[in-house]
Image (spheres, helix red, strand yellow):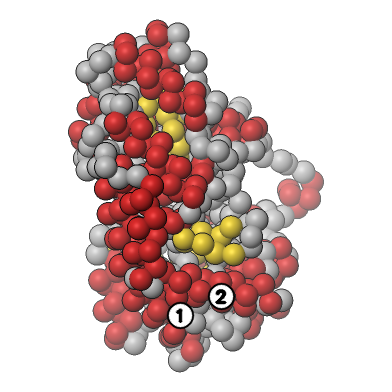
Amino acid sequence: MTRKPIRIITVLSTIIMILAACSGKADLNKDAGAVGNATSTPVSSPSAAAKPNGDTGGLKLPLVDKPTTLTWMLPSNSSNIKEDRLVVQEILKRTGIKVEFQTYSPQTYQDKLKVVVASGKLPDIFSGLKPAELKKIGKQKGVVAINDYTDQLPNFKKLYVEENNWVIKSYGDENGKLYTWPIFNLNRDVNHGFMFRKDVFDKLGIKEWTNTEEFYQALKKLKEAYPDSYPYASKGLVNIFRDWSFGWGLGNGDTYPSYYDEKDKTWKYASVQPEHKEMLDFMKKLYNEGLMDPEFLTDTQDSWTTKMTTGKSFVTWDWIGRLDLFYNQIKDKNPDYNLRYANPIGPTGNVRTLPKVSDFSVTVSNNKNKEAALKLLDYLTSPSGGELMTIGVEGVNFEWGKDGVPVYPQLKDLPLVDISVLEDRYAMWLEGAYLRPDRRSVYYKFSEKEREAQDKILKGKKFEPVDPILNFTDEEISTLAQLQTTLQKAAEEFNAKYILDKKYGDSQWEEWKKTIAKKGLDAYIKVYNDAQKRYDAAK
């Protein structure tokens, strides 16, 4: 499914140019990462039966004592969400609030949002503003400082004041005011990584690698068996450096090449670190020996797909959904095709840790409906609200299957019930309206191959630490904006030359470090470390 932008938005959103290979306006499956207990079974108890709406986290229903209508603007491929949709009806029934969803396609949403904001006629709830712009409107009292109402919001208080108190430090303004309502526990544990053609490996008697040297030796054996092949192929373009960086301890998904060194407790720039040179040297070796596709920095998705499904390449890095997609695409011609999730490479042997808290800039306008809007968001952040928005209403649109996964009788004739179907039929999984996804949802139902990927990394605890999400001042944002593109472009150009030009080596590396220093690297990293000092000092 091609939908749902899962953006892990930091205050640097205005300047980050290179995002994850499947980020931005991509689907949930491609952009998110984290937790996957998809087989947990529903618990029924006398206390649950006594609460027909489930666990509201201490919030009393209904939320209002008189009829209230709220407008909610968000991106969706479902353009006609009316009163007859399950979610709209159930929210009204439970909370007393009638929600009028104003949806616009993800492709046009940002343009429409600009027009609405410029008009000054803001919906009661909306999402999608860049953090700097949202804070600016907040300081002008256009949107609500959510933490001013903490005492009325038990679910917000529990999750973002008590259990994750860093949220206000990271996403609030310099006065400690938070204008964005976070999303809790959306991401899967493992969503991307290395993959290999297990059918070909088995045929040649090659074992899956467990370290970088074994990875190299496996590629060599593949090349020997298939001289016309390039064993490793990539469609990530320059993102390959970020994608591999976690295995060398240099990774940061949102601010790369900037990353936090947990050992030194300082921010550094990956592109000038010794570990980065080691990674480039390894890539250079693969390239020179014909083990890496010469088009690894330029390949298109269609060309890459052809290589990975016809025997021209056998190893890659991508989203875990590809494991089944490629098989379904090729099974009629090659029923033995078997793409599997592989161990990471690099000295750390780790992958990216995806965050438990996501920021879509969900915000509430400062108007007469603000308290009702805040309480509605708090309800949707409760376990009860999370179940409604991502599973549905038991006995109405779903029943529990034997494996603890919801079954939708009304949709039994569809070949696949995914979150795009649930959005279209029931107004579930509306972007920015799922504030606490329920882990029992179909989104967390993994195929056998996807489950293997989760288990491989979880059991091995192969995760890099999560870097702090920093909060920058307006002046710092300006400094970063002035330098970021120049530095990153220079780094990408050097990376390519270092690998592709056989003359490049130690002397060019030393010269590179001097060159990028002249482009303002010290000033750039100083901003991060200054912000880190404030972060550490904040309570």
Above-or-below relation of 113 to 33: below
Q: Secondary structure at mark 2?
A: helix
Q: CA distance from mark 1 to mark 2?
A: 9 Å
In this rendered view, identify the residue nearer to me: 36 or 286: 286
Above-or-below relation of 487 to 3: below
> Residue 95 at x, y = what percent?
58, 67
The residue that label 2 is drawn on is 531
Residue at x-position 36% and y-position 50%: 507
Q: Are marks 1 and 2 in contact (CB under 8 Å)?
A: yes
Quadrant, the N terminus: top left
Residue 370 visible, this angle? no
Horizontal side of 408 relative to 65 (left or right) equals left
- Binning the other alpha carbons within 10 Å of mark 1 as few (below 14), some (14 to 19) or many (20 upward) gives some
Residue at x-position 30% and y-position 67%: 486
The residue that label 1 is drawn on is 476
> Residue 272 at x, y = what percent?
44, 56
Residue at x-position 46% and y-position 26%: 215
Residue 460 visible, this angle? yes
Amino acid at dot 1: Glu
Q: Secondary structure at mark 1?
A: helix
Residue at x-position 54% and y-position 81%: 173
**Counting residues from the N terminus, which is met first, the one under dot 1 or under dot 2?**
1
Quadrant, the C terminus: bottom right
Q: Residue furthest right?
A: 46
> Residue 303 at x, y = what percent?
20, 33
In this rendered view, identify the residue nearer to me: 212 or 284: 284
Amino acid at dot 2: Ala
- Binning the other alpha carbons within 10 Å of mark 2 as few (below 14), some (14 to 19) or many (20 upward) gives some
Above-or-below relation of 259 to 410: below
